[in-house]
Amino acid sequence: MSEVQTVENMVSITIDGVDYKAKEGEYILNAARANDIFIPAICYLTRCSPTLACRLCLVEADGKQVYSCNAKVKEGMEITVSTPDILAERRAMMEVYDVNHPLQCGVCDQSGECELQNYTLELGVDSQSYTIQDTKREATNWSSVLHYDPGLCIVCERCTTVCKDMIGDAAIKTTKRGGEALDKAWKDEMPKDAYAMWNKLQKSVIAPSNGTEHTNCSDCGECVAVCPVGALVSRDFVYTSNAWDLKKIPATCAHCSSGCQIYYETKPASIEDRTEKIFRVTNEWNYVSLCGAGRFGYDFENRTATKDATTFAAAVKAFKKAKVINFNSVITNEEALMLQTLKEKLGVKLINREARAFQRFLGFYSEASGQSLYSLDFKEVMATDFVMSVGSSLRNDNPNARYAFNNVQKLNKGAGLYFHPVGDTLVPTFGKNIEMFAHKVGHEEAALLFIIKLFADQDKLPSSVKEQLDSDFVELLGGDTAKFEKSFEKMMKKKESFSLMVGEDLYFHEKAENLAKLIAVLEASSEVKVAMIPPKTNSLGVALICDLDDEAEGYTIGYNESGDFKLSALGDGDLDMPAMNQQEGTLTNMHKRVTPTNAALEYNGYVLNDIVREVASAPKETIMWTEHLPVSKGFKAVEFDSLPNHYTNDGVEHRGYLLESTSVEVEEISVDKFDDSNALEGEIAYRCNPQRQFNDFSDKAHQIFEGFGLYTSPAKAEALSSKVEVEFANGKLTLDVIVDERMEGDIVAIPDFKSAENIYELFAGSRYQTVTIKEV
Amino acid sequence: MSLEQFKNRNVGTQNYKTLDLDHTPVTGMGQFKQVVSRTFKPELFVGLWVTFREMINALFRGKMHTTQYPFEKLPISPRYRAIHDMLRLLESGHYRCIGCGLCEKICISNCITMDTQYDENQRKEVSEYTINFGRCIFCGYCAEVCPELAIVHGPRYETASEQRASFSLFEDMLTPIDQLNLQQEYQGFGAISPNADENIKKTPLAY
Amino acid sequence: MDATHLPEVTAAGVIIKAVLILAVIAAIAGFGTYIERKILAFMQRRYGPQHVGPYGLLQLVADGIKLFTKEDIIPQHANKIIFAVAPVITAATAFIALAAVPVFPDFTIPFIDVYVPSIASDINIGILFVLGMMAAGLYGPLLAGMAQANKWGIIGSARTAIQFLSYEVVTGLSILAPIMMVGSLSFVDFNDYQADGTWLVVYQPVAFILFLIAGFAETNRTPFDLLEHEAEIISGYVTEYSGMRWGLFFIGEYANMITIGVIASVVFLGGYNDFWIFPGWLMIIGKIAFSFFFMLWVRAAWPHVRPDQLMWLCWKVLMPLAVVNVVITGIVIMLVQ
């Protein structure tokens, strides 16, 4: 990690005669980029493994030609970026890329942001020496969002690389093009690398890896982002706008707690309608990867809002008599602080279920460990080589956690343990050294104890833990002991750093306190560091800022939640509020980072700050609250406008600031005894959203198609009819059955993204619930 | 061209001819002489003769100078920059515009707007296109930048309208399909230079 | 023609003559605008008005309709009575002056046997009367300019007063010499004096030129159209006038042009005497028409002068010349007798 740069692991290198420092073990290309030296490269992606498809990054290191994306720096290495030979190679490669590339730059969606164009100009290609007969390649739609035009594709394989190394879907691969064979005569005429590159290029094209015409993936669109040419475009965006017409608004994605850096790209909607519309979302794909919700779920803005004085007066009146404010985590830190101020001044109670659960869990953890926040952020998780996950449906809960789990396997030659009651067919495919435990619901403590048993230094363990470690956890968690011992030995080879990701299951667990203590014990007694996945967008921020209540009664104001008076950014409430793409403020993401977001679209109505100013007191603008965020909880007294929002070439994130974590000495921890009879039996429902769905806002976006229904594994679906009634202890739901091909086992998933369905009430403070499923 | 001639700002000494004018008389006698000489010079009659001659020219020698504007129009240069025309391909009759958006981008008065979409032939289709002639300054950049010579300046220079903002749609400017045979190739700003062929470097083709 | 053979001038004849003058001159004034626009256009190789009616002849009807139907605007701070009266003064004096001028030869209406004289009123001080009425016409622009509460109007009327009064002197002095020769102030006597075919311009070329110059000034024509010099003072004394009130000034100006033309024709250019094969009535119409044309011609050819040049010309050149001319004429007459 760049944050942990120290003098010891830096080496000195010389690039074109100038001395530079580089991190030991880094690729030459990355070292050059970090020092602002330009080496041409098309196929390389910073956080993925080298593809070696383009070969443009050829440099001379210590007198030998090497590929800078693949060669690591050594102390005293002398690098020359361009020699006449290398320049000839590069020029030949660019000429080869230009062979038969359609001259339709005028209409291409890359519209000038094209790396093929840039490098063609950069390397001064003004004539073509090579030629081959073209192959007919038809444009196809790979999925509901992906559009692929193989005619434009230069087969740099960035898409396949990012899909495999970062996303983990590995949904696309290179396949046979069926083109003319290369004339052997070229071999003697052309530079060597250029010929090899061409030979490969002429044979391949990208296609879905499942052999069909359609990808079966999470539709994250990261392949679209990394495509250097206009071959991969989102279906909705095809031929609708030139890149230069779009205004980039740096923002933070507000769908989940990843808080990814995004740009909303806006321009007037059409000739008739000159209001700004978001045409697409882009990201700094070298440093951050989005999920489908972030990339395609952008049009959730509240268009209906107007400044209606009477409804505003009604809202002020409602706030004055309110006893409770019910809200969720899709809220900025500033708004959370406003609500906390209202609590302090008016004595209202604040209800936020998911943030409260997380707050309690974090509290228990802090109490036991002495640390105000969890140890790792997810960028640091990505740098470890042994990663574990407990209590989170990795594929659905948080894309960044999943990407981290995958990336560790691919890039760090890592290993992983995945504990979750709901089986998953995707996670084991992330790498060869992954063991999955589909344990019983209620056995989360056993999972943690198992991890303690595997990694902890027995001498450091408190007695209350030590005495529980004798049982055969592998068996208990549903694995094969003998097989596991063998594979675990393999997994542990050359492993240096260990991380554990814990998720929402634990926060809503009835033994949450005990689980938090076990995590603290694990951290205190082993090298394993823990990262927590906040359940929803800004749950961490809300948990830190607000003093949340468990129960409350009386006149309720709902903010994007149900209530007697409803504030809503969805346009269906009593008073309109701005949606996240219409407001500025900060969000606290799971990387323990406070990141700024900006308003991409105009908003014509009232904001929460207006109400707070009427009923209590507030500054003129919402963002003036930023500097008042509680310093005691790790926030900094920084003005909103001075928050940075960018990445530098060496991959260092300059977005907002990191929360300060404080630690104190604690006494020995005493944990409860694990009772394996607590396991839930029978038909079990799991509160879990499908991929790309997180809340009402992602649901509102027109490119997010995942519906509200009962998600089951294919096997389970066969036992059910297409529509079922799910009966809870305190209510029932009628749902369509939707097959999630990557689920395994009998547990069914019920999404909670529709706040109107009151799923949290049905699950009654837990993430798992026994239900009765009846056919309708 | 060197900058020397631009740096010489003493324009007065360059190509101007000074008239050989008499000095204004200062003495009474001089003034009297000037009056007499001017009075008896037939200059006044020269003026009368010139106007009379022109009348004769106009009436009887067919040298009437007037162009009866709304009924008669003078031919204008192909380089004249008037209301835009959208040209079609002569071969297929399809409009030439590919929707690249360069005219929209280069337009310095921001008067061009277009909407594009993906059509059923997998091509970029211009679904709507407008020029606000209330804002257009007829600079000709759009025609110059157009890679297809699809948007060009036509000869229609009557731009008066009832409103300050006067929007023209794509269809208004497009060559009517039945008049395709009358479509003139544009010669003005941005047209292909006569020696364009010499400047082309040919790309080898395998077939 | 011998005066003694003329039939009796009846009241009916005078009234018919008066109506005739009023109608014809007013019409000609309108028609004059058409002619002016056409002539100026031709001299600039243009067509002039040509779209209203054949050859644009109905342009003057269109203009008339426009003038009549325009809103009658009187400025808020104007002296409304004087503002309303001023254009009438101009038009009225112009037509009154025509009363003592022989316009068209005399004729007898057949069947009813009414003799229409060439002059509505052949008073024996005809020239004095005409010059006097034209001088009285000064009140029109003067009052108009002063009544309209507009600084351009004031400047215009001041210029009017200066220009008219100054050139009145030249007109009077220049025409004094012919009067001395003829010995009468009656236009008829002037006409008869030249009945032998020798025009007075032959004897009095200087007087003729002076009279022409002064005539241009009196009728506010280029090169002396400083009263409404639009580049300097908007429109001078008619700045605030519009519609028919402005039209009256216009008609007055054109009537004056005709008057000057008539005087020049009768006093200097042989009047309505027959000439060679041309009858007298054709001659007078031809002469008036030419003098009208000449005014337009001059307008097309010459630029106008500055106000100071105008005054300088009047008092330092024309007036002394006129006086000298009168003196020389007197001496010559004395010597001949």
Image: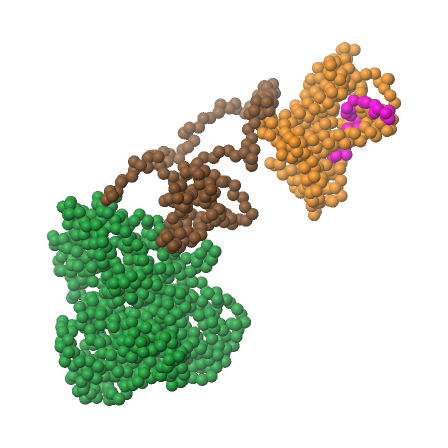
Chain colours: A green, B brown, C orange
Residue found 71% across the figure and 36% down from its top? C249
Please, is residue A135 above or below residue A348 in the view?
above
Task: Name the outermost residue toward the left.
Answer: A63
**Which percent across, then down, holds residue A93?**
21, 50
Q: Nearer the viewer, residue A188 or C17?
A: A188
Specify whether residue B66 is in view: yes
**Which percent across, then down, holds residue C246?**
70, 38
Residue A627 shown left or right of residue A443 in the figure: right
Q: Nearer the viewer, residue A442 or A508?
A: A442
Task: Count how many numbered circles sit on residues in the image.
Answer: 0
**Which percent across, then down, holds residue A151?**
29, 52
Q: Which residues are magenta?
A: C90-114
Residue A710 shown left or right of residue C36 in the figure: left
Residue found 26% across the figure and 89% down from its top? A677
Residue C287 shown left or right of residue B175 in the figure: right
Residue found 31% across the figure and 36% down from its top? B197
Residue A200: which quarter of the image?
bottom left
Q: Quadrant of the C terminus of chain B?
A: top left
